[in-house]
Amino acid sequence: MKVIVTGASKGIGRGIATYLAMDGMTVGLLARSQELLEDLAQGIRDQGGACETAACDLRDLDATTGAIGELADKLEGVDALVNNAGLVIRKNVFDLSPEEWRRMIETNVNGVFYATRAALPHLQRSGGGHIINISSISGKLPLPGGSGYAASKYAVTGFSLSLFQELRDHNITVSTIYPGSVDSESHRHGDQTDTSWKVAPEDVGKVCRDILTAASGTAISELEIRPLRRPPKS
């Protein structure tokens, strides 16, 4: 299976891409930093995995379309897209600047739309496939102190659930994953040092693998993954 993962260079995306590659899939790595992508690609190849890279800013429609087309050529087709790239700015409405709001919406919402639009023709040429959108628990539940981030993830949820209905007759399955607290740099807030209780990025990769390998004719449309343990008391 040939899978493109956006935001693959670090955090949850790096965990997803690495896990899928180690599971035998060929992965297209997409992120802004070519240097970080090459570092990840080298690590995957050193472990016997197969991958290709393309760098772009997902906030740019033309750049995103070009990068996904480049990966489709290198991979010789696309079977799945994992829309993972996202920006976390956890501030309340008093402190969140209009520029920070714009950056989150352009990355978390526009980027998902641009990548989806770019990948659809390649999925259709493959006869169908999968789109996995990484939302957040904050895309289902209120997040006091992070209203802008929650708004962007609620948008991803609404887009994903509607997209499922739009694409199911085209043999394209759309799944939405809602991670809880994940042990990635962008999801660490404050000075808390004990992150052992959180979900590992690779565990989100396992969930993606299970979705992508579900029985033909079935669809896992929504899935939550949360830590079993509670956060330590401060």
Image (cartoon, rainbow, N blue to C red):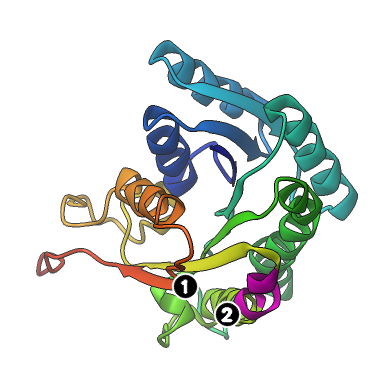
Q: Which residue occupies 48% across, 64% down? A: 217
Task: Classify the position of the C terminus by image quarter.
Answer: bottom left
Badge 2 vs badge 1, beta-carbon distance below 8 Å: yes
Task: State the extent of the magenta-drawn residues as a range.
Answer: 163-169
Residue 1 vertical position relative to residue 206 in the rendered view, above or below? above
Amino acid type for the residue under numbered disc 2 = Leu
Residue located at (79% from left, 38% from top): 67
Task: Answer whether residue 91 is magenta in the image.
Answer: no
Dot 2 or dot 1: first in sequence order is 2
Q: Label 2, label 1: how many angstroms apart (C-alpha)?
A: 8 Å
Q: Is residue 102 left or right of residue 84?
A: right
Amino acid type, callout 1: Ser
Q: Position of residue 1 (x, y in %)?
A: 53, 37
Secondary structure of the residue carrying tag 2 is helix
Seen as rendered, the residue at the extreme top is 46
Q: Is residue 39 above or below residue 172?
A: above
Residue 215 locus on image (x, y percent) = 40, 57
What is the quadrant of residue 232 in the picture?
bottom left
**Circle 2 sits on which residue?**
161
Label 1 secondary element: loop
Would residue 102 appear left or right of 38 to someone viewing this image?
A: right
